[in-house]
Image (tube, helix red, strand yellow):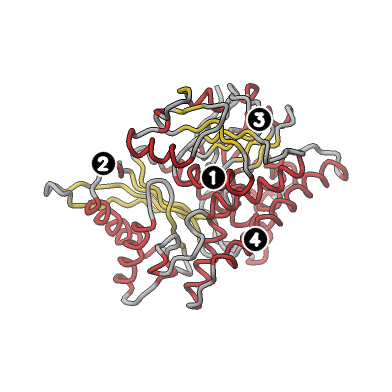
């Protein structure tokens, strides 16, 4: 049976790349485990007057290249292994983008959808009081993730500022612009993915104006991706799904109608004039580009041979398993790895952190221009390493392997320079 534990998958991805690049054994050993794991239990008063004790995590995976960087999730099925895996992937994501951060991640086990705004505020502030001494603008810089929002980041920044006795906007990114957020941050993950897709289309010969696209997931990333891929490229979105189900129309779906459908019925699957489909059917639909933008382990060894898309753009974290990665590669599907595709969020988070630190803020056009430059370079750096291994070392490696080789090499060199091994 295929391994689906996210942290074991992350370790195996590291192991595979380490073997290809002949990574120093001591560096490999250091990189297989997080450097710091914090587990906290903290009380929160609910609206009915009861006290509930919540469990939260913060994992600092590696800080050789700079302060930790990574989001905070509020999710009922959050696990420490998921947080560790995401922290590892953040390490590689920051390194591949060549920004001066290490990797980190956090989470709280809770059902945010069932909590009131006041309860969420108490939860957010309680979490920061619990982990406050382990974070900071020069230690570990959180950000939003699944079921956390700019408003939650603002509450967390405010609570941290109270703890340290001065204003500290740079402790957290993804904040509202009114309290130090960067322009362009909220759609930066999807915007970065669009720059990667633009270059991938050039490499594969896909005409984006004629391309058929399916997006799995209609959260922030999927929603922004839908809007951008139609506005920037004129592509036709024929399928979309959320946690309840999906919808398909060969004639294409309308963004505004989808938003209204989601708001009024609770699911995009209720879109009028289209066919209801499952998430499985969406993944296997007859399309040019597939954008998994939901959760991990969606394309596996069981369904990878049924994927018809020419390009898989991994907007979610870990949507493709190791077994699936090999199958897609053998079938010549261009599978673009998550820590390249969705790095736009952390790149613009880095911009926000820089702006907070020196108190000067850039216009939107400058943010997008800098994002475009960094993520486009990451794409071509990755393709070059893949090509070089194929030609000079006679090793056929996946794009994911190539991205890992670049990211791991940079972190290993930083650890070596620090004298860690």
The residue closer to the viewer here, 217 or 111, is 217
Q: Rate crowding at label 4 as few (under 14), some (14 to 19) or many (20 or more) other CA atoms within 10 Å.
A: some
> For the residues carrying marks 4 and 3, which lies nearer the camera in this image?
3
Q: Which residue is mark 2?
A: 114
> Where is mark 1, residue-wise?
225
User: Is mark 2 in CB contact (under 8 Å) with mark 3?
Assistant: no
> With 369 as the anchor, is 364 left or right in this view?
left
Q: Secondary structure at mark 4?
A: loop
| Chain-order first, disc 4 or disc 3 | 4
Q: Earlier in the sequence, mark 4 or mark 1?
A: 4
360 w.r.t. 159: above or below: below
- Mark 1 and mark 2 lie on one chain; the one further toward the N terminus is 2
**Is label 3 in a helix, a strand or a loop?**
loop
Q: CA distance from mark 1 to mark 2?
A: 27 Å
In three-dimensional space, the C-alpha distance between marks 4 and 3, rounded to whole angstroms, equals 30 Å
Within-10-Å neighbours for mark 3: few <14, some 14–19, many 20+ = many
Q: Nearer the viewer, residue 287 or 279?
A: 287
| Disc nearer the start of the sequence (2/4) | 4
Task: Give the residue at mark 3.
Answer: 309
Which image quarter holds the C terminus?
A: bottom right
Sequence order check, earlier mark of 2 and 3: 2
Closer to us: mark 4 or mark 1? 1
Label 1 secondary element: helix
């Amino acid at each position: 049976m295929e391994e689906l534990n996210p942290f074991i998958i992350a370790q195996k991805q590291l192991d595979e790349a380490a073997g290809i690049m002949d990574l120093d054994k001591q560096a490999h050993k250091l990189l297989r485990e997080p450097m710091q794991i914090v587990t906290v239990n903290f009380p929160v008063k609910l609206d009915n007057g009861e006290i509930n004790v919540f469990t939260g995590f913060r994992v600092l995976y590696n800080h050789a290249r700079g302060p930790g960087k990574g989001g905070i999730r509020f999710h009922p099925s959050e696990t420490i292994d998921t947080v560790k895996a995401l922290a590892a992937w953040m390490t590689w994501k920051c390194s591949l983008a060549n920004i001066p951060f290490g990797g980190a991640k956090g989470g709280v086990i809770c059902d945010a959808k069932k909590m009131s705004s006041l309860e969420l505020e108490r939860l957010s502030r309680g979490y920061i009081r619990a982990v406050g001494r382990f974070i900071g603008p020069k230690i570990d810089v959180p950000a939003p993730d699944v079921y956390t929002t700019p408003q939650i980041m603002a509450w967390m920044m405010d609570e941290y500022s109270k703890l340290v006795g001065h204003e500290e906007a740079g402790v957290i990114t993804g904040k509202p612009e009114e309290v130090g957020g960067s322009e362009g941050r909220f759609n930066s993950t999807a915007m970065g993915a669009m720059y990667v897709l633009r270059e991938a289309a050039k490499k594969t010969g896909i005409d984006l104006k004629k391309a058929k696209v399916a997006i799995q997931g209609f959260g922030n990333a999927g929603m922004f991706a839908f809007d951008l891929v139609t506005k920037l490229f004129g592509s036709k979105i024929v399928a979309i799904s959320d946690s309840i189900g999906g919808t398909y129309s060969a004639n294409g779906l309308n963004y505004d109608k989808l938003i209204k459908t989601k708001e009024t019925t609770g699911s995009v699957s209720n879109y009028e004039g289209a066919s209801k489909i499952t998430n499985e059917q969406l993944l296997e639909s007859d399309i040019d580009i597939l954008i998994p933008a939901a959760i991990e382990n969606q394309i596996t060894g069981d369904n990878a041979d049924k994927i018809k898309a020419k390009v898989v753009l991994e907007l979610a974290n870990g949507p493709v398993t190791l077994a699936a990665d090999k199958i897609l590669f053998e079938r010549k599907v261009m599978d673009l790895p998550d820590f390249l595709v969705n790095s736009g969020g952390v790149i613009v988070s880095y911009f926000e952190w820089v702006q907070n630190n020196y108190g000067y803020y850039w216009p939107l056009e400058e943010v997008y221009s800098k994002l475009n430059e960094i993520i486009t370079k990451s794409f071509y750096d990755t393709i070059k390493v893949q090509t070089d291994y194929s030609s000079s070392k006679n090793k056929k490696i996946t794009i994911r392997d190539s991205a890992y080789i670049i990211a791991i090499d940079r972190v290993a060199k930083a650890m070596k320079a620090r004298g860690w091994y």
